[in-house]
């Protein structure tokens, strides 16, 4: 399971029907589900992301998590995180999970994040969406569970 995590001042997703879901200060998480991923990996990655200390303390050092600052979270499903650009001119997505199990794990991950009692918004699985964000820092972190694939 892979996550591209951005510390944001704000972020939003516009769904195909025009609905816009927005957050203020917090995390924008692009989540990719791989063919070997399961509930255990989803829980471990969720715990890592929510407790990742990438928000500044009074001395501007990374010392606080999104939980500490009571930030907001926007989770976007992004199978393209499993795209392998080295196999040809078009990315190879064969290591991404098939849609049905991927959707189940995506929804499970979102549910796990929601159990933190933070404000959580999510995109629509397998939909074409428009994402806007104001990256703070910029701070962008790559997280993968298990580490190294």
Image: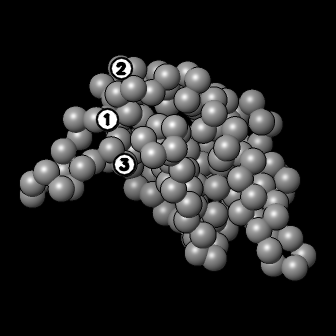
- Answer whether labels 1 and 2 touch (C-beta < 8 Å): no
Q: Is residue 144 above or below residue 55?
A: above
C-alpha gap between disc 3 and disc 2: 17 Å
Quadrant for residue 40, please give it: top right
In the picture, the quarter occupied by the C terminus is top left
Task: Judge by depth and name the residue closer to the eye, 73 or 88.
Answer: 88
Sequence-first disc among 3 and 1: 3
- Which numbered disc flags the more N-terminal residue, 3 or 2? 3
Q: Residues within 10 Å of mark 2 (few under 14, many from 20)?
A: few
Q: In 3D space, how far apart are the residues under numbered discs 1 and 2 (Cα atoms)?
A: 12 Å
Please tell me which residue lies in front, 89 or 100: 89
In the displayed structure, does residue 33 sit left or right of residue 114? left
Q: Which mark is residue 96?
A: 1
Q: Which residue is mark 2?
A: 100
* Residue drawn at 22 percent across, 35 percent down: 94
Give x and y (percent) for residue 32. 42, 41
Q: Secondary structure at mark 3?
A: helix
Drawn side of residue 72 relative to residue 94, left or right: right
Q: Does residue 97 appear left or right of residue 19 in this picture? A: left
List x then y, in percent, for residue 34: 38, 33
Nearer the viewer's eye, disc 1 or disc 2?
Answer: 1
Distance Cα–Cα, label 3 vs label 1 = 8 Å
Image location of residue 102, percent across then percent down: 40, 27
Q: Which residue is mark 3?
A: 81
């Amino acid at each position: 399971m892979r996550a591209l995590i951005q510390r944001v001042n704000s972020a939003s997703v516009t769904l195909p029907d025009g609905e816009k879901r927005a957050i203020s200060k917090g995390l924008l998480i692009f989540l990719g589900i791989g063919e070997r991923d399961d509930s255990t990996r989803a829980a471990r990655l969720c715990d890592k992301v929510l407790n990742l200390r990438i928000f500044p303390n009074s001395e501007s050092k990374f010392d606080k998590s999104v939980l500490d600052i009571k930030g907001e979270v926007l989770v976007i499903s992004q199978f393209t995180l499993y795209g392998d650009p080295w196999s040809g001119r078009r990315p190879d997505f064969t290591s991404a999970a098939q849609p049905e199990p991927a959707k189940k794990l995506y929804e499970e991950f979102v549910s796990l994040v929601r159990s933190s009692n933070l404000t959580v918004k999510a995109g629509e699985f397998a939909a074409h969406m428009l994402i806007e964000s104001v990256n703070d820092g910029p701070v962008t972190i790559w997280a993968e569970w298990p580490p190294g694939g």
